[in-house]
């Protein structure tokens, strides 16, 4: 395997990815195929979505201490049902996280299968890549557990800071700014490697597993050999991904504004949003596959036979 290929570019796959997206979704347009691939894309991103934030400082600061005291008294007086409720909620959240990761792992291979072979199939990739998806799920569980362990002290410190401010009744304390900055830096230092690991697992390790039928850890070993020899190129890939995500965000924003925000309401509906955004999801998946294919034919998922009677997406 050549670890130092020439001509690697983050911009070169953009145009072929756009053409590949057109080929998969519009040449010819097949509504059944669109909905099938949309279902795979929905599973691949299952459980991901926006969050609504409420302002915790909407009340007057003069009442903060009193409110905190009342809340503490209420909590102590109702421990018999509050503690079981909290434990139950934590268990439910953990179960949902495990379920979401499992469905995302299955969906990742299903979407890759559809894009690589230009097919709108659900049952075939669901069965075919069950073993690889299980390995990916276990890896994602381990990665999530590591992230939770690393983030718990940070979240606990933030919670303690706000509890102290509520206890004192003085609202925001400027003296806590250095501590909050340190917390932010710690969060960045811990979360950045995890985010890169999640990105590279989805973008590169999953295709390697798909091509070679290996476990997630074996796929990472293959990727490590590429990373060691092409560190700068992959760093540039991450930076260019930020540019792509910003561009895609503005495309979605333009869609929402052009539909007078009605389109935005459809985007938050499970599955419907994935169907509407399918061209974006297919482009993003195709782009990463084309970038990886530049490192050698053994990393090219499009070298596999296309669906009978259909043209290949890419000829290299």
Image (cartoon, rainbow, N blue to C red):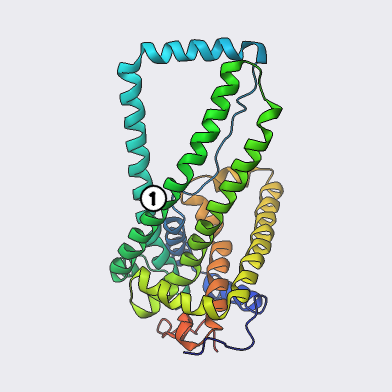
The quadrant where residue 27 appears: bottom right
Horizontal arrangement in the rendering, residue 75 relative to residue 230 (left or right): left
User: Residue visible at 46% across and 14% down?
Assistant: 72
Q: Check disc 1: other Cα within 10 Å, few if <14, some if 14-19, many if 20+.
A: few
**Where does label 1 land, which residue?**
145
Can residue 60 be seen here? The reply is no
From the top left corner, tell me how far across and down residue 86 is, in percent: 36, 28
User: Residue visible at 41% across and 75% down?
Assistant: 221
The quadrant where residue 288 appears: bottom right
Q: How many marks?
A: 1
From the top left corner, tell me how far across and down residue 87 is, in percent: 33, 30
From the top left corner, tell me how far across and down residue 309 is, in percent: 43, 85
Q: Relative to 4, does residue 255 appear above or below in the rendering?
A: above
Horizontal arrangement in the rendering, residue 45 relative to residue 83 (left or right): right
From the top left corner, tell me how far across and down residue 223 is, in percent: 46, 75
- State the quadrant of the C terminus: bottom right
Q: Relative to 116, does residue 150 appear above or below in the rendering?
A: above
Q: Relative to 90, does residue 73 appear above or below in the rendering?
A: above
Can residue 73 be seen here? The reply is yes
User: Residue visible at 39% across and 14% down?
Assistant: 76
User: Residue visible at 57% across and 64% down?
Assistant: 279
Q: Relative to 316, does residue 226 appear above or below in the rendering?
A: above
Nearest the eye: 115 or 223 = 223
Nearest the eye: 246 or 152 = 152
Which element type, helix, strand or loop, lies under badge 1?
Answer: helix
């Amino acid at each position: 395997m050549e670890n130092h290929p020439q001509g690697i570019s983050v911009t070169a796959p953009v145009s072929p990815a756009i053409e590949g997206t057109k080929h998969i979704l519009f040449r010819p347009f097949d509504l059944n195929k669109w909905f099938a691939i949309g279902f795979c894309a929905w599973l691949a991103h299952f459980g991901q979505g926006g969050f609504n934030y409420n302002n915790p400082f909407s009340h007057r600061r003069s009442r903060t201490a009193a409110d905190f005291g009342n809340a503490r008294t209420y909590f102590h007086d109702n421990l018999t049902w509050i503690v079981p409720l909290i434990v139950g909620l934590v268990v439910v959240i953990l179960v949902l996280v495990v379920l979401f990761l499992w469905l995302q792992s299955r969906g990742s291979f299903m979407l890759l299968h559809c894009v690589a072979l230009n097919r709108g199939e659900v049952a075939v990739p669901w069965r075919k890549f069950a073993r690889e998806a299980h390995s990916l799920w276990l890896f994602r569980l381990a990665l999530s557990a590591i992230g939770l362990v690393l983030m718990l002290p940070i979240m606990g410190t933030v919670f303690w800071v706000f509890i102290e401010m509520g206890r004192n009744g003085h609202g925001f304390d400027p003296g806590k700014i250095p501590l909050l900055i340190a917390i932010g830096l710690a969060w960045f230092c811990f979360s950045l490697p995890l985010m890169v690991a999640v990105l590279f697992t989805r973008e590169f390790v999953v295709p390697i597993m798909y091509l070679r039928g290996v476990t997630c850890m074996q796929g990472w070993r293959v990727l490590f050999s590429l990373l060691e020899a092409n560190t700068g190129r992959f760093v540039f890939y991450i930076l260019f991904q930020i540019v792509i995500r910003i561009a895609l965000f503005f495309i979605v924003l333009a869609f929402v504004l052009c539909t007078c925000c009605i389109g935005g309401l459809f985007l938050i509906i499970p599955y419907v949003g994935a169907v509407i955004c399918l061209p974006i999801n297919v482009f993003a998946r195709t782009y990463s596959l084309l970038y990886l294919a530049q490192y050698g034919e053994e990393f090219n998922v499009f070298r596999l036979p296309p669906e009978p009677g259909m043209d290949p997406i890419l000829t290299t």
